[in-house]
Amino acid sequence: MSKSKNETRLKKILAAAEDHFAQPVDRVTAPGGEGRSSFRLHFPDRNVIATLRPNFRRTHLEAHVLKSLGAHCSDLPECLGVVGEIMFQADVGGRRLNQDIVNHSREGQIDLAAQAVAAIFRIQSAARKTTLAQMMPQLGSNVDWVSNFVDAVDFLAPYGGGISSRFDRGAAYLRIADPGRQFVKWDCRSGNAAIGDDDRLRWFDFEYSGLRHGAEDLAWLIGDEAWPIAPDTMVDVVIDAFDPACGHDLADYLDYLSVYLTFHCVQRIKLITKEARKRGWLSKERIRKYDDAGVHPEFALQMCRVGAYFAAQSALTAPLVRNFDGAGQTFIDLLDTAQPRRSA
């Protein structure tokens, strides 16, 4: 976005905010960078997040989601109002999970992971007490989306000697195409959660929420390339937090999670590779600061390890393990040669 357009957008937000809250804004910061949709407005007595998205219908839908869920749980921001195309919501804290978690011991990291997963299950439980399942859009419900999601495995064909003939693509389509009717936040990457001054972890950015199986939210977290926790540990965390009221048997839930995560990891590896070709490798600090795609060889390697682990958990995806291992070796080799271009 050009500087002039950004300034015009910010002026619009400030005018709406000062009118809506009837007090002046002291200063403005951009937690995700100047080009993002949200700004942090610093009032004399509190901070507020103002969001102006390109699609005003999506903004109003997100506000409705926050209000509906907020009546039943406190694991998300409070919606403070909508003025035209601009939504105001409570600031859930400046300590983003993706940055904060690396400052903890292993035990502290697992505790944060447990909080994040438990909050996801509570949000989904809250949604079942609302009418969101009757009005939210189905996500990934068409044939093209499913086929593109699964067929992305062809990206891994050069690694590990091609895609095995034992991989049943048709069965994979069927498994992924069974979305269910559970509310999902979507995009539960660790950069979309924060810890507040009360030390409470909350999820934000419900722009893309809709309906699916439910395990997808956990897949976004575990399949976040900047997430530092080993996949087997995350399975233990999920089992401990599992909510049987979600409508799935635990064993079937974990199998679906494994299959979905396998293909999700392929998508992330594709994205990282594409961005690396375009922009070069970036520093891990910059990636976490701006909640950017994980364009660093270590993050790509993490996705290969997570993908291999979860692929091995289901007979449906087990033939793909060798492809993840092969891709992982490529990124191991790159660790010695690839130097990040930017550190800030």
Image (spheres, grey):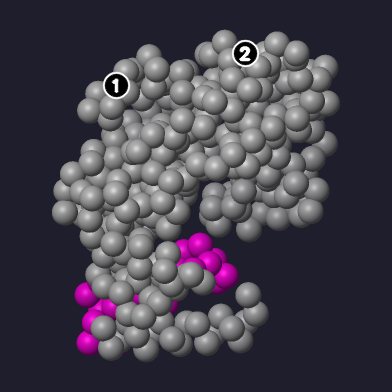
Mark 1, Cα crowd under 10 Å, few <14 / some 14-19 / many 20+, is few
The Cα atoms of the two marked residues, 2 and 1, are separated by 25 Å
Work out which quarter of the rendered image holds the N terminus and state it: bottom right
Of the numbered discs in the image, which one, if any, rests on residue 318? 2
Residue at horizontal 80 percent and vertical 48 percent from the top: 277
Q: Is residue 184 magenta?
A: no
Q: Amino acid at mark 1?
A: Asp
Mark 2, Cα crowd under 10 Å, few <14 / some 14-19 / many 20+, is some
Of the numbered discs in the image, which one, if any, rests on residue 240? 1
Above or below, 30 against 219 in this view is below
Residue at horizontal 59 percent and vertical 83 percent from the top: 5
> Which range is magenta?
21-46
Residue at horizontal 52 percent and vertical 13 percent from the top: 313
Q: Amino acid at mark 2?
A: Ala
Instruction: Report helix, strand or loop for mark 2.
Output: helix
Nearest the eye: 107 or 189: 189
Indicate the position of residue 321 as horizontal and vertical percent values: 66, 16
Please identify the quarter of the rendering in which residue 159 is found: top right
Residue at horizontal 54 percent and vertical 20 percent from the top: 310
